[in-house]
Amino acid sequence: MQRDPILVVDRETGETFEEVVLGEKWIRWAYQNASAKPVEKLLFRSSLVSRLMGTWFDSRLSRGKISAVVEQLSIDMSEATQPTDLYNSFNDFFARNLRPEARPFDADPQQIVSPADGRVLVFPELSEDVFVPVKGHPMSIRTMLPNLAERFIGGALAIVRLCPADYHRYHFPASGRITAAQDLPGALHSVNPIALGAGPDVFGENKRSWTLVENDMIGGYAFVEVGAFGVGSIINTTTQGAVEKMQEKGYFKFGGSTVVVVFEPGKIQFAEDLLSNSAMGRETLVKVGQPLATACEAPAR
């Protein structure tokens, strides 16, 4: 069974590192071994297993897992608002709040920030409606955003892939007003590049929610939360009205998950390091609030 390491560029140090994947051997077996197809259907195309996992992770019985995961994934708990032993369940810990000073950001309205902690891949100009994740197959915003995709054809797109080690609350990358939203049922495939390389249309098949936000400077942007294996819940805490940059939008419960932000054509310019790394097929480890893109100058009248 082929093992291609998942290489990620750390934005803060500039160094490339190999990602530690919880349950990597199991994920590779489920997606890369032909004999595992019946298991793949049971686990990822049905929500039963994820619901059962969610019930356990919501219970006090799961508290014992917290310390082990903090140590295994080297999670910096000094950023959190409370110590490890005060969480009531693993999901309580997983959706932990951070101290505001742990994630500073530029308040300039022309600066668009990362909506989450995670591994970022950007597409500065879509070929019609198509984008191709790392190690993945071509995917379409038409299947990801039914009834909404047309205004984003040829636009720009950023994928922020969250791993279990990450802070799992997500925030608005720019201010604006929510004008539409939709929840879409679906499968719960892993969002790990190992799974993407096996062919499932994660962004078109998985359970997901999209929100349309209208912004005076960059027009409309679509904010998409994609659930994945072990994530039975996408919890949106802000669902209507005016929103501010870095205001909390919601959070994921346990598991891998992804946030996608889609912009209209010609409205934004992604940060240079994200463009450079993405062009090499490498994700960039970024924290919420750090620079994602800059709004393009408004055309002269």
Image (cartoon, rainbow, N blue to C red):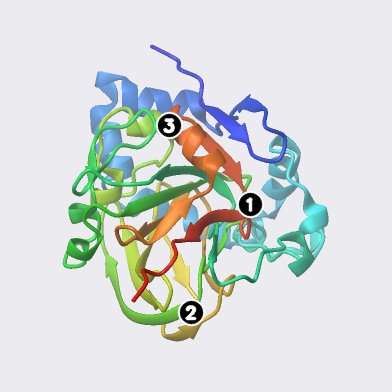
- CA gap, disc 2 to disc 3? 34 Å
In the picture provided, is 179 more to the left or to the right than 87?
A: left
As drawn, 26 above or below 49: above
- Residue 36, image x and y in percent? 29, 25
- CA gap, disc 2 to disc 1? 21 Å
Does residue 108 show up?
yes
- Residue 99, image x and y in percent? 77, 66
Whether label 2 touches label 1, CB < 8 Å = no
Q: Residue at label 3?
A: 279
Q: Residue furthest top?
A: 1
Q: Which of marks 2 and 1 is nearer the N terminus?
A: 2
Q: Which amino acid does label 3 sit on?
A: Ala
As drawn, the label of residue 238 is 2
Q: What element carries label 3?
A: helix
Few, some or many residues within 10 Å of mark 1 (<14, 14–19, 20+): many
Q: What residue type is labelled 2?
A: Thr
Does residue 84 show up?
no
Q: Residue at label 1?
A: 287
